[in-house]
Image (spheres, rainbow, N blue to C red):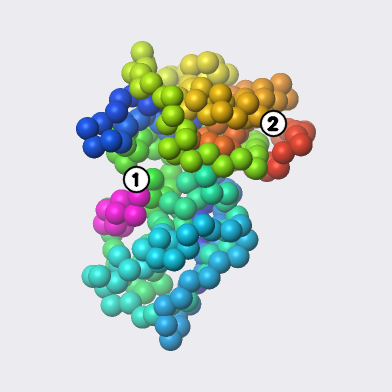
Amino acid sequence: MVVFPNAKINIGLNIIEKRLDGYHNIESCFYPIPFTDALEVIESKELSFSSSGLEIPGIGNDNLCLKAYQLLKQKHELPPVAIHLHKNIPIGAGLGGGSADGAFMIKLLNEKFNLEISLKEQEKLADQLGSDCPFFIRNEAVYVEGKGDVFSPINFSLKGKFLVLVLPNIHVSTAEAYQGIIPTKASKKLKKVLESTHIKAYQGAVENGFEKSVFGQHPTLAQLKKELLAQGAVYASMSGSGASLFGVFKKEPNFKSSHPFKVFQL
């Protein structure tokens, strides 16, 4: 059985305050995009994991696909399986690719072995893998709060728009992105802005709080954002803690860049 775990982008990302547990409270909108890995699972004589495509650091038992299998095996009778992941979504790009792989593994096992796990329970299981993981169970636009694990519905859609996703060969760790961050509460709730403002007015009003810190360390990323806007994007931003950037276009763009990029119709 094969599934295709997809990436997400952040439409706005405000870092509101540091929590007592060391994490930060944020607000953002997670939005799924059609940029995917490929995940295959077949029954086997023994549990195994292999990968192709982009290199995955620290495969071992830290891999979220293996962790998802072990998590479900605690409560369900699962046979040994051979797992193969073709990695296409860059790691450390702010696109949630690893989280998607773990969540899609839960969904795949549930369907393949008829485990009849409810969506709500799948989300609880995914939360044990990482704060972004539950988003990929339902895989639809949500307003995000808490440490990135509290979801609520949002009336927001980019359907019919074109997305240019720029993938520079730069890795930004979460720890690196948080350097120099000063948590600040926004004057208006992000959800209200997204639901009541036309996308043409997002630039300057819907921001990613990591950009100031990350752009200071990687000026190339700031320049790429300027390129997206100069070539017609109605809105451009870094996704997550970087280093990918995206631009939203009203019509199919003739985008040019010296950095790798992909174009999708949403």
Mark 2 Cα-neighbour bin, 10 Å: few <14, some 14–19, many ≥20:
few
Which quadrant of the rendered structure holds the C terminus? top right
Q: Residues within 10 Å of mark 1 (few under 14, many from 20)?
A: some
Which residue position holds label 2? 251
> In the structure shown, which secondary structural element does the residue marked by tag 2 occupy?
loop
Taking 258 as reference, is 111 above or below it?
Answer: below
Query: Is 26 or 152 nearer to us in this picture?
Result: 26
The answer to whether residue 171 is visible is yes
Foreground tag (2 vs 1): 1
| Residue that lies at the very extreme toward the top in this rendered image | 187
Q: Is residue 138 visible?
A: no
Magenta residues (range): 121-130
Residue 132 magenta-highlighted: no
- Report the label total: 2
Relative height, residue 105 to residue 73 (above, below) = above
Q: Residue at left 23%, top 70%?
A: 75
Q: Residue at x 52, y 16 (%)?
A: 204
Q: Residue at x 30, y 65 (%)?
A: 71
State the residue lying farthest toward the bottom. 45
The x and y percentages for residue 139 are 43, 48
Could you tell whether 152 is left or right of 246 in the image?
left
Residue 188 percent coordinates (x, y): 36, 16
Q: Amino acid at mark 2?
A: Lys
Write down the residue under mark 1: 131
The type of residue carrying mark 1 is Ser
